[in-house]
Amino acid sequence: MSGPAPRLVLATHNQGKVRELRELLRGQVPGLDVDTQVVDAGAVDAPDVAETGLTFAENSLLKARAVAEATGLLAIADDSGLAVEVLHGAPGIFSARWAGRHGDDQANLDLLLAQLQDIPDEHRGAAFVCAAALAAPHGDATVREGRLEGRLLREPRGAGGFGYDPVLLPVGETRSCAELSPAEKNAISHRGQAFRALLPEITAALAG
């Protein structure tokens, strides 16, 4: 790889997450070139890690620790999903495969709405939850969590975002997450909250 050597790896192949982390870190650590030194898993041949934990925090820690050990770099990982109050926190860690096949957003959304069709609006509380973990090779690990509270709509609204975005109406909003602009969503999102909460540990580790 040309340019400075990588210093931080995000345990994902999702370029949107990488861009978000780079912008969060831009200007925060003297001498850090975020465009070349903050990389995704593929850039350093980091392994894919099975999410075998029982919570978002456990899964994010599993991924961050495994990638840090494999690459010798500081590593960040996150795990996120939708927690519905009347379903006692489900789909939770199974959000991406709620309908049985991983990543089938439409099937997951259809199943969830069918399960909640008789639930009145006042009991449709839900939140997007994200746990983000930072791990050092052979060292400590830290987890921080973010939550975007809201309620579930009865029908999808909006063409933006992905997953359950079209049916979550954030508290204080009149638009679903899928109707918000990317900048508006990032400003309040569960993932943005978790990454920002982890920022002091990230900057301290990189500056050390």
Image (cartoon, rainbow, N blue to C red):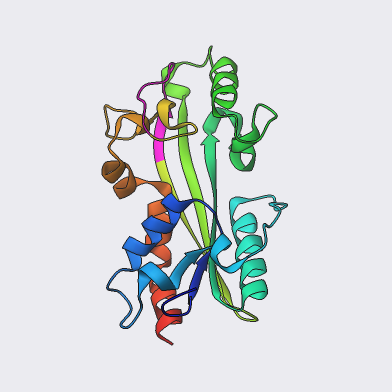
- Answer with left or right where residue 154 lies relative to residue 13: left
Q: Nearer the viewer, residue 164 or 34?
A: 34
- Answer with left or right where residue 143 lies relative to residue 153: right
Question: For residue 194, which quarter of the picture?
Answer: bottom left
- Answer with left or right where residue 127 lies relative to residue 170: right
Q: Residue visible at 37% across and 21% down?
A: 157
Q: Is residue 33 above or below residue 153?
A: below
Report the span colored magenta.
Answer: 149-160
Q: Residue visible at 26% across and 27% down?
A: 174
Q: Residue visible at 42% across and 19% down?
A: 121
Q: Residue visible at 53% across and 32% down?
A: 85
Question: For residue 31, which quarter of the picture?
Answer: bottom left
Where's residue 205, x and y in %? 46, 80
Q: Is residue 117 magenta?
A: no
Q: Nearer the viewer, residue 198 or 163?
A: 163
Where's residue 202, x and y in %? 43, 73
Q: Is residue 14 above or below residue 200?
A: above
Q: Nearer the viewer, residue 204 or 68?
A: 68
Magenta segment's dominant SS is loop
Where's residue 18, x and y in %? 43, 58
Q: Is residue 150 magenta?
A: yes
Quarter in which the C terminus is drawn: bottom left
